[in-house]
Image (cartoon, helix red, strand yellow):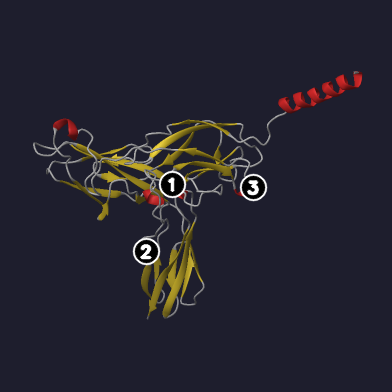
Amino acid sequence: MKRIVSTITAVAAVALSVALAPQALAATTVQGGPYTGLSSDAPTNIHLALSNYPTTHGLYVLEAVKPATSARPMTTNAATQLWLSTDTTGGAKSIKGDVVLVVDNGHSWGADCLHQECGIFIRLDHTATSDTSEDQFIPLTFAASAGTGSTTPAPTSGAATGLGPDLLTVTANGKALAQNVPGTISYRTPLTFVVTTGSGVKATLKSYTPDLCPVTGNVVDALKGTGACDIAITSAGDATHGPITAHFPLIVSPGVQSIKITSASLKIGKSATLSALTGFGEKVTYKSASKSCSVKGSAVKALAVGTCSVTATAAGTANYAALSTSVVVTVKK
């Protein structure tokens, strides 16, 4: 009897120790939202709070289409994927506090989240690619859009007037934009919107992401080199057209550095001053391997008849890539 009691006590002790042991391999706990009724007309910010997350590896958090099997998703929104970690020295964002993931209806990345099962997929990052212990999928649902075409956005209050919504035709720097289909904008490379309405009334622009893409009149700028912007265009309508507000998302990309002077023509013995700074204010370094010209600082001097190719380089940042280009100098007698 004593042996049986001892055995039971030992088993109970083991069970208690298991119950109290830290859940080292448990999946990250995720709270937040919204997860349901998301707009099909514009990107949505999903706010997440993560806990019980790993400290030895980071996490990838992204929008994806749920696969038919237990395999990892193949169709994903790479443009807004987040890399989160407790260690941010390698470029990851902090996993602590408010984490914001931008999701949309999937049209920009080959999906249709109104008819496919889309959601937020979480997995360990590139430091543990084969470890699936943190894999989890959080379903998202999207509300149907009332839009009737790429240039006929859904009305916001036209139904209340009994009139059909006004028609919007939109271009940015001459390129046609369509509601719900993300366009592109580069860092500090403004887009000038031209909006034609069916009613003839003047439409107005508003940025729902003003810290990233502010609007001045009909010009939109990007203040960072990554992210997603939401630009809304509104027409008040008239006696025969109902009011409308349509959303035109923009995916932000890094800017492209350039220099003003890309060529020069000099006579032997003459000099010219090249661009000292790029359009983004980075110092340009010039080098010449040709015998036809020499370079000192940003000044090039013609030495002999011929064509001289001068290499121009400048540092980059997270907002724009490094510059590497050539200036062609033609040397004449």
Q: Position of residue 210 (x, y in %)?
A: 35, 37
Residue 12 visible somewhere in the drawing: yes
Residue 187 visible in the current orientation: no
Can you identify the residue that label 1 sits on? Answer: 226
Mark 1 lies on a secondary structure that is loop
Please determine whether, in this image, residue 206 is positioned above or below residue 177.
above
Using the image, tell me which numbered label, if any, was put on residue 128.
Answer: 3
Looking at marks 1 and 3 on the same chain, the residue that comes earlier in the sequence is marked by 3
In the rendered view, does 94 fall on the left or right side of 253?
Answer: right
Question: Label 2 to label 3, Cα distance in Å?
Answer: 47 Å
Identify the secondary structure beneath mark 3. helix
Outermost residue on the right side: it is 2
Q: Which mark is residue 261?
A: 2
Instruction: Identify residue type, mark 2.
Output: Ile
Real-space Cα separation, disc 1 to disc 3, in angstroms? 26 Å
Q: Position of residue 109 (x, y in %)?
A: 41, 51
Q: Nearer the viewer, residue 295 or 82?
A: 82
